[in-house]
Amino acid sequence: MSASLPHAASAIDPKIAARSGNGDHLAFSQLYDQSSTVLFSLAVRILGNREEAAEVLQSLYIDVWRKTVRYDVGRGTPIAWLLTLTRSRAIERLRSSSPRVQRQDGSSDGILNLPAGEFEAPADQALRTVISKTLSELPQVQRQAIELSYYEGLSPVEIATRLSQPLDAVTARLRLGLSKLRESMQAYWEHDKSA
């Protein structure tokens, strides 16, 4: 992981965290950009499974957006708050495992075998669908760069090295792909807010 990532996460402005839970799309986007890689790495370390870690983070960010969890300035920094929430949810997920779906380590978790929506509110499934659809429509090189960044926690330099591609090309792919994801999510949020 790039040394700049923890620094960016630790430099999250408390006002951004507070505004994220009050419907400010730009603040939420900034909070996500500055914290997602660090939180994902923590969840993967605890769960030992990237898919489960991604689900934990998705649930966490949805709860932040929907004001289910709120940042309290008096209780520490935004990144400490998010790390605590991530750790708690990942450990809770480990403890609540059931024997229905194979995990990467051979253990099981019943959530993935259930029909879509049984463990998620309909809006959560709708957001997941929007993100999945947008990712699937991205050019393969953009999708690959985003997946390596967000699911494996690689920096642009590490992605360029792994793919044997110029750093400028990788950076451009990340920027373009993330821009398309933000547009799709913003359209979803605007529609969700007006509904």
Image (cartoon, rainbow, N blue to C red):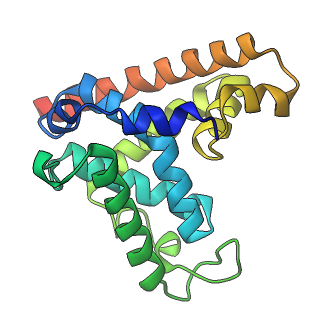
Query: In the orientation shown, which residue stands out farthest toward the bottom?
Result: 99
- In the image, 142 versus 10, the foreground residue is 10
Q: Residue at x 22, y 51 (%)?
A: 76
Where residue 152 appears, as percent x and y from the top left, is 66, 46
Left or right position of 190 against 103 = left
Quarter-of-image position of residue 85: bottom left
Say if residue 170 shows up in the picture: yes
- The quadrant of the picture occupied by the N terminus is top right
Say if residue 123 shows up in the picture: no
Q: Residue at x 54, y 69 (%)?
A: 46
Quarter-of-image position of residue 107: bottom right
**Vertical side of 76 occupied by 20: above or below:** above
- The quadrant of the picture occupied by the C terminus is top left
Where residue 17 appears, as percent x and y from the top left, is 22, 38
Left or right position of 178 against 89 = right
**Vertical side of 41 occupied by 114: above or below:** below
Q: Residue at x 61, y 46 (%)?
A: 151
- In the image, 35 versus 101, the foreground residue is 35
Where residue 123 appears, as percent x and y from the top left, is 26, 49
- In the image, 186 versus 137, the foreground residue is 186
Left or right position of 60 against 158 = left
